[in-house]
Image: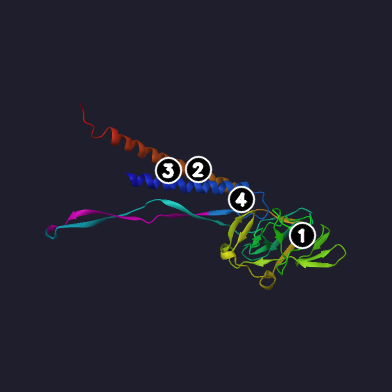
Amino acid sequence: MLRGFYTAASGMIAQQRKIDMSTNNLSNADTPGYKTDQSSLRAFPKMLMQYIDKQGTTGIGKASIGSLATGVYMQEATPLFKQGSLEETNNKTDLAIEDNSTDSTSKLFFPVQASDGTVKYTRDGNFSVDQQGYLTTASGNYVLDDNGNKIQVNGTDFSVNEDGQITSENGQAIARIGLSYAKDPNSLEKDGDGLYHLENNATLPNAYNQQNGFQIKQGYLESSNVDESQTMTDMMTAYRTFEANQKVVQAYDQSMNKAVNDVGRVNG
């Protein structure tokens, strides 16, 4: 009976994590460049059940009953690196990557320098200019050029062409916006604030030497790729599954209560 408790409880925990993940996706539906998370449910190893069987003259042996499932767990939440739609903002500090890859997978990222000095990556091009004139993310991380240096634009009067070249109002070249290429985007791990990093803080190669068929769009932002209606459906399904497992736990609890307090009671 205790196995049933553990199996149903593991299902409740897995569905609760799916609900939390869906809630986070919905809360970031309006976050530029956000990539929706997907859950991966896995089953615990099955248990082989056997019973003791009398085998004629050979004595006592074991006979197989079969395998018993022992529950599920949510192994991980992985981002769906599908490009979101581009929305025009007419803000000169807003940049978006239009990746024309055949599988619609986002493999290009803006490199930024985090507060700890490490290089992170983002699809959120909602940039601004700080008091020193450097191009930064909304959370204050420095946007890097194609040589890994901070970009000083000294104001918002600058232009960025489709090839990433940044020029001042008078046409003077400033830098080329950095662009990194991830052959396998699933190797990136989420950091929060729309940032990603590689294991051991490794760096991605320069996209200008690796990839063709992309454009940098100034005055645009990439919207999140959260499908709100599908996410709400997934959340409701997870909630109903959670409730079903909860009822199983309650049924086992009532059975245990009877087994402890009623069955085998000695009448006075």
Marker disc for residue 239: 2
- In the image, which residues are magenta? 39-56
Residue in the picture at 61% in, 64% down: 103
Give the structural element (helix, strand or loop) at label 1: loop
Q: Nearer the viewer, mark 1 or mark 4?
A: 1
The span from disc 3 to disc 1 (Cα, nearest Å) is: 53 Å
Comes first in the chain, label 1 or label 4: 1
The span from disc 2 to disc 4 (Cα, nearest Å) is: 18 Å
Q: Nearer the viewer, mark 3 or mark 1?
A: 1
Comes first in the chain, label 3 or label 1: 1
Give x and y (percent) for residue 212. Answer: 69, 70
Give x and y (percent) for residue 244. Answer: 43, 41
Task: Tell me: 22 left or right of 257.
Answer: right
Category of crowding for the residue at label 4, using alpha-carbon neighbours closer than 10 angstroms: few (below 14), some (14–19), many (at least 20): few
Comes first in the chain, label 1 or label 2: 1
Q: Amino acid at mark 3?
A: Asn
Q: Residue furthest front?
A: 116
Comes first in the chain, label 2 or label 4: 4
Asked if residue 223 is among those painted magenta in the image, a careful observer would answer no
Contact between marks 1 and 2 (CB within 8 A): the answer is no
From the image, give the main secondary structure of the stretch colored magenta: strand
Image quarter of residue 187: bottom right
The span from disc 1 to disc 2 (Cα, nearest Å) is: 46 Å
Residue in the picture at 63% in, 57% down: 195
The span from disc 2 to disc 3 (Cα, nearest Å) is: 10 Å
Category of crowding for the residue at label 2, using alpha-carbon neighbours closer than 10 angstroms: few (below 14), some (14–19), many (at least 20): some
The residue that disc 1 covers is 134
The residue that disc 4 covers is 227
**210 in relation to 69, above or below:** below
Give x and y (percent) for residue 240. Answer: 48, 42
Q: Amino acid at mark 1?
A: Tyr
The residue that disc 3 covers is 245
